[in-house]
Image: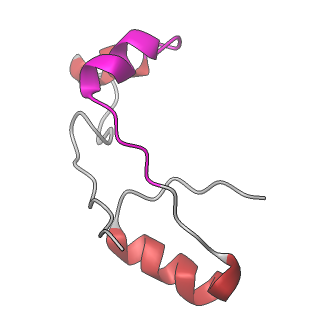
């Protein structure tokens, strides 16, 4: 089992093409507040202070998954 964090649809489409029928997507949706509360490494705080550039969920949005 492998985990790939791919916020962009074009990357998920490429994974689907490469891995074929053994690839499936799991979408977890959570508010930014909850992510910040659970962030033991302080990544969301650092991204909010512009110490981490292009941090998905703070600086960059992700392409949500389409519903089946």
Q: How is the image coloured?
A: secondary structure
29 lies above or below 17: above
Q: What stretch is highlighted in magenta?
A: 27-42
- At 58% across and 70% down in the image, what residue appears? 24
At which x and y percent is residue 44? 35, 21
Q: Nearer the viewer, residue 42 or 22?
A: 22
Q: Kindly give the residue lying farthest to the front in the view shown.
A: 68
Quarter-wise, where is residue 8 in the image?
Answer: bottom left
Q: Nearer the viewer, residue 45 or 63?
A: 63
Left or right of residue 44, residue 17 in this image: right
Total numbered labels? 0
13 lies above or below 28: below
Which quadrant, please, contains the C terminus?
bottom left
63 lies above or below 27: below
Query: Does the stretch in magenta take in 31?
Result: yes
Left or right of residue 62, residue 25 in this image: right
Left or right of residue 33, residue 52 in this image: right
Q: Nearer the viewer, residue 1 or 52?
A: 1
- At 64% across and 87% down in the image, what residue appears? 20
At which x and y percent is residue 11? 44, 72
Quarter-wise, where is residue 52 in the image?
Answer: top left
Query: Does the stretch in magenta take in 2?
Result: no
At which x and y percent is residue 65? 33, 64
Q: Kindly give the residue lying farthest to the right in the view shown.
A: 1
- At 26% across and 26% down in the image, what residue appears? 32
Which quadrant, please, contains the N terminus?
bottom right
- At 28% across and 54% down in the image, what residue appears? 62
11 lies above or below 32: below
């Amino acid at each position: 089992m492998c985990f790939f964090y791919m916020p962009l649809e074009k990357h998920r489409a490429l994974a689907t093409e490469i891995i074929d029928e053994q690839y499936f997507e799991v979408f977890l949706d959570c508010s930014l507040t909850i992510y910040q509360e659970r962030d033991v490494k302080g990544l969301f705080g650092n991204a909010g202070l512009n110490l981490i550039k292009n941090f998905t969920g703070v600086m960059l949005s992700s392409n949500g998954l389409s519903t089946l």
